[in-house]
Image: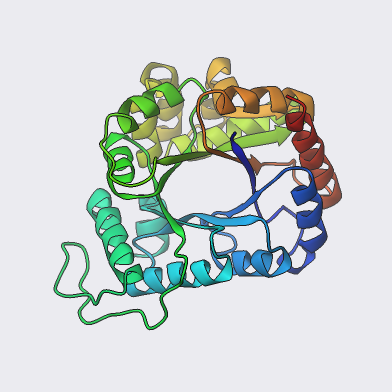
Amino acid sequence: MTRLGVTLPLEGLELYQHRAAIERLSTAGYVDLWSGEVNGIDGLSQLALYAGWNDHVGIACGVVNAFTRPPALLAMSAAAMGELAPGRARFGIGAGSDVIVHNWNGIPFETPYTRVSEALEFVQAALRGERSEGEYKTFASRGFKLSRIPATPPLLLVAALGPRMLKLAASRADGVVLNFLSAGDLDRIHDVTDNVKREEAPLEVSARVFVVPGDDRSAEIAARRHIAGYLTVPVYAQYQRWLGRERELTPLWDAWAAGDRKRAVDVIPQEVVDDLVLYGSPRDCASGIRRYMNQGLDALTVGLMPAAGTDPTEQVDFLVDLGNELAVR
């Protein structure tokens, strides 16, 4: 059974206004509340609020950045999540992108695989109560030891955009977080992760699926713009090449590089749009989500992308209807 989650916060609703929405979503079958961390609300503050309001939903950051948060802070944040929601917390670590790390934060975006690998190693050791000793390749930390070890640490997840990160997650983490892939792409993911020997519990595979309410032309355009904005970032472009979409997406990349944003949006093949973003009615989107669930996902997170100015109540109504549709299986 795939766990159903939703990415918060919702557009147009400030954090302190989410309590009633969370209760409705929980009743409609959403068992996990996920956060992201790009250029809006940070990935952790909101989760403390949600955990305090509801003591049975899971909380998950998907994900915080291994470059912009130093190792000791990552470990302290993971420990805090373990205390906030014992047995219900997931702490995701990822590399982000050159845009977030270098352009926005002024940090060199170098050796992202090694940075995430070492951050994961550091956090795992800290949650075991160990003291840091010596230098790592991508950072230094000597003498750090958590003064509060959660009785139930959070599950540690790795965000993966390609085979190396997938193998890292499969060999050393509790789970992997996926993004921007079709239901059919999950076969390729499993081909990698299933061939990695694990000593611990089975790997938890989770994916965020982007959903645009509405079945008119504006919903499709919103989906196209979302794809163009993300898949032209180098790490996402390389990921799509690995997934086999180089031929289909080369016109997008060429138009974007030439500065023609309108053409970049227009030349995305329809099949790519339909593969990577769900749009339409709650029933239509539920049908698309089931395709992912049937591919062996352990957790699926709905990333809602409403039209600008959509009333938050309408967003919650859509998500509730979507959850109810998924309950009818």
Whether residue 108 can be seen here = no
Q: In this view, does 159 lie to the left or right of 290?
A: left
Q: Which of 36 and 234 is in front in this view?
A: 36
Query: In the picture shown, does residue 141 fall above or below 174?
Result: below
In the picture, the quarter occupied by the C terminus is top right
Residue at screen point 24% across, 77% down: 131
* Residue 49 image position (x, y, % from top left): 66, 69
Q: In this view, does 275 lie to the left or right of 12?
A: left
Query: In the rendered image, which quarter is residue 275 located in?
Result: top right
Q: Nearer the viewer, residue 215 or 169?
A: 169
Q: In this view, does 67 lie to the left or right of 150?
A: left
Residue at screen point 75% across, 37% down: 323
* Residue 263 image position (x, y, % from top left): 54, 26
Query: In the rendered image, which quarter is residue 286 located in?
Result: top right
Q: Nearer the viewer, residue 129 or 117?
A: 129
Query: In the picture shown, does residue 101 fall above or below 7?
Result: below
Residue at screen point 38% across, 27% down: 190
Query: In the picture shown, does residue 64 fall above or below 172?
Result: below
- Colour basis: rainbow
* Residue 310 image position (x, y, % from top left): 81, 46
Residue at screen point 22% across, 68% down: 139
* Residue 280 image position (x, y, % from top left): 75, 26
In the picture, the quarter occupied by the N terminus is top right
Count of number-bearing discs: 0
Whether residue 300 can be seen here = yes
